[in-house]
């Protein structure tokens, strides 16, 4: 009798563990589907759905400047996905992409031996891996970004870590991104703590902050498809595909982390540190939202 | 009698100049309001709003409504809306620039004067 | 005795009045700055502090000796910012979920 009881208990414990393991991303999947659906619906027919999504955009502007309907992969192009003037301007700029020179530098840096004779290849034997970053490392119990992975590779090879955000680190990431171009983003949520990190990133994305009392969501979900001054607001969906990005405003390449802390500062908040826990969580959430989308970085933005 | 006449003249002149001065100061307030509206470091209102009656503002955004007929609203209503829009519309994307002390009460008064004068319904 | 009491009361009232009318009293600058700093620290630790608050406190500290009136005004402004940031965060904690697309 007792044996039987133990057996039943053991079986039910194992099966419940399996159920839980499969469910760490249940909420995130629900969120992601609704997120994608919002953007697809919004850009299905902006003229017919003007009252719901674009009440203050003049009809003439919708007719003249809006590109629609948009498909899932179209959102990789940021504001150029929906705003015709931006698309035309950037088609010209990308005839000679400004990221090409830093990308070449990145290739050189990647292949240049460290003092110990090894190269980055010792850590990244297959450079087409950007679609898996940032990932949740269950053993370390933290989010690992691609920038961290590069710096950890340097440190174990006796080199100094690079400064985050721009410069050489952005160039090396650009090389990895270029090698990963066309790969589909594949972010996993492998544990309960990973799900917690996802939720924390989600809150940072949706909760209003700063003296302007605005959130990432208010500009890059709700107001996507509208202009702030003359600037077309980019969709959050697909917003990590182009990283690292050459921004004309920066006059150089920058990483996702740099872009995120810049955006948080623009809400009137204190600028958080790159690679700090909240910023990594935000990157984790945001990249998860674009799961299944093909990478297209490095690219150019305003 | 002469004194009364003199007094009357004085009063008339005084009233007239006060009216002129008032009009002039209101003009200055309207001008200041427009500056707050279009300056990025001040109100930066043009980032989201166009203004009926002032099409010369370049590159106005399309996030908020085109502001029109604001003379039909009480001054206080517009002031409060600018001070903290979340009070009446909790999920408004419009920043509470008064409450956050990004712009001063005087600057909001100037904005109200500019908007009411510029977006007149008739 | 009565007279002494009266005089001392007047003196105390006068001194208190002086202290109140004279914000340059060192203790009020210090307490204004300490108050702002504590509120800022709380907002900062919750990652909701506003962009300029830290700088405003720094300015207040720099002026504490030379221009205490201005220093107190700056410290109070910084405290207001930190308070508003914390209150705002508490408020949006209740409502942010409604913003998530369903």
Image (spheres, coloured by chain):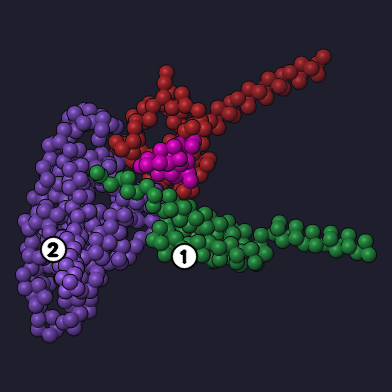
Find the magenta span and give its range.
B79-99
C57 magenta-colored = no
Which residue is at 33% across, 41% downward? B47
In the rendered image, what is the letter of the chain coloured red?
B
Which chain is indicated by disc 1? C
Quarter of image, res B119: top left
Crowd rating for badge 1 (residues with CA inside 10 Å; few <14, some 14–19, many 20+): some
Which residue is at 46% across, 48% downward? B100
Query: Which residue lies under the disc numbered 1?
Result: C41
A196 and B7: which one is in front?
A: A196
In the rendered image, what is the letter of the chain coloured purple?
A
Could you say whether the residue bearing mark 1 is in a helix, strand or loop?
helix
Cα distance between the residues tagged 1 and 2: 36 Å
**Residue positioned most to the front:** A1
Chain C drawn colour: green
Which residue is at 21% across, 31% downward? A49
At which x and y percent is residue B109?
51, 36
Q: Are marks 1 and 2 on the same chain?
A: no
Task: For residue A192, say whether it is visible.
Answer: yes
Where is B69 relative to A32, above or below? Answer: above
Residue A132's label in the rendered image is 2
B72 left or right of A33 in image = right
B60 left or right of B81 in image = left
Q: Are marks 1 and 2 in contact (CB under 8 Å)?
A: no
A245 and A101: which one is in front?
A: A245
Where is C18 relative to B20, above or below? Answer: below
């Amino acid at each position: 009798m007792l044996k039987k009881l133990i057996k039943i208990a053991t079986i039910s414990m194992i099966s419940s563990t399996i159920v839980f393991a499969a469910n760490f991303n249940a909420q995130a999947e629900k969120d992601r589907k609704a997120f994608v659906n919002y953007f697809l619906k919004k850009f299905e027919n902006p003229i017919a759905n003007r009252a719901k999504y674009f009440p203050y955009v003049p009809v003439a502007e919708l007719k003249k400047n809006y590109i629609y309907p948009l498909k899932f992969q179209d959102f990789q192009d940021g504001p150029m996905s929906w705003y015709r003037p931006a698309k035309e301007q950037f088609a010209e700029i990308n005839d000679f992409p400004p990221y090409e020179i830093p990308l070449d530098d990145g290739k050189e840096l990647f292949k240049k031996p460290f003092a110990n004779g090894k190269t980055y290849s010792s850590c990244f034997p297959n450079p087409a891996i950007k679609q898996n970053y940032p990932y949740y490392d269950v053993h370390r119990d933290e989010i690992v970004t691609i920038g961290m992975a590069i710096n950890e590779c340097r440190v174990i090879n006796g080199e100094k870590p690079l400064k985050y955000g721009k410069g050489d680190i952005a160039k090396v990431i650009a090389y990895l991104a270029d090698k990963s171009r066309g790969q589909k983003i594949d972010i996993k949520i492998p544990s309960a703590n990973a799900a917690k990190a996802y939720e924390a990133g989600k809150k940072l994305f949706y909760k209003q902050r700063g003296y302007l009392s605005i959130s990432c969501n208010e500009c890059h979900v709700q107001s996507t498809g509208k202009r702030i001054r003359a600037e077309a607001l980019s969709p959050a969906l697909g917003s990590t595909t182009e990283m690292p990005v050459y921004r004309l405003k920066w006059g150089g390449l920058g990483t996702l982390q740099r872009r995120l802390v810049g955006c948080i500062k623009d809400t009137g908040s204190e600028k958080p540190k790159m690679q700090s826990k909240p910023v990594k969580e935000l990157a984790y959430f945001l990249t998860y939202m674009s799961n299944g989308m093909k990478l297209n970085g490095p690219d150019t933005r305003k | 009698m002469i004194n009364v006449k003199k007094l009357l003249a004085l009063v008339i002149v005084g009233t007239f100049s006060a009216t002129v001065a008032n009009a002039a100061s209101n003009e200055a307030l309207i001008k200041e309001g427009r500056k707050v509206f279009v300056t990025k470091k001040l109100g930066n209102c043009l980032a989201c709003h166009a203004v009926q009656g002032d099409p010369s503002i370049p590159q106005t955004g399309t996030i908020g409504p085109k502001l029109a007929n604001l003379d039909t609203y009480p001054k206080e209503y517009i002031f409060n809306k600018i001070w903290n829009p979340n009070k009446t519309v909790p999920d408004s994307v419009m920043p509470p620039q008064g409450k956050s002390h990004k712009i001063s009460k005087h600057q909001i008064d100037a904005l109200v004067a500019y908007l009411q004068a510029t977006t007149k319904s008739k | 005795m009565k007279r002494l009491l009266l005089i001392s009361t007047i003196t105390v009232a006068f001194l208190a009045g002086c202290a109140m009318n004279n914000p340059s009293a060192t203790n009020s600058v210090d307490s204004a700055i300490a108050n702002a700093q504590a509120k800022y620290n709380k907002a900062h630790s919750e990652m909701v502090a506003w962009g300029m608050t830290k700088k405003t406190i720094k300015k207040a500290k720099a002026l504490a000796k030379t221009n205490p009136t201005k220093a107190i005004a700056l410290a109070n402004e910084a405290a207001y910012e930190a308070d508003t940031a914390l209150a705002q965060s508490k408020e949006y904690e209740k409502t942010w979920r409604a913003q998530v697309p369903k």
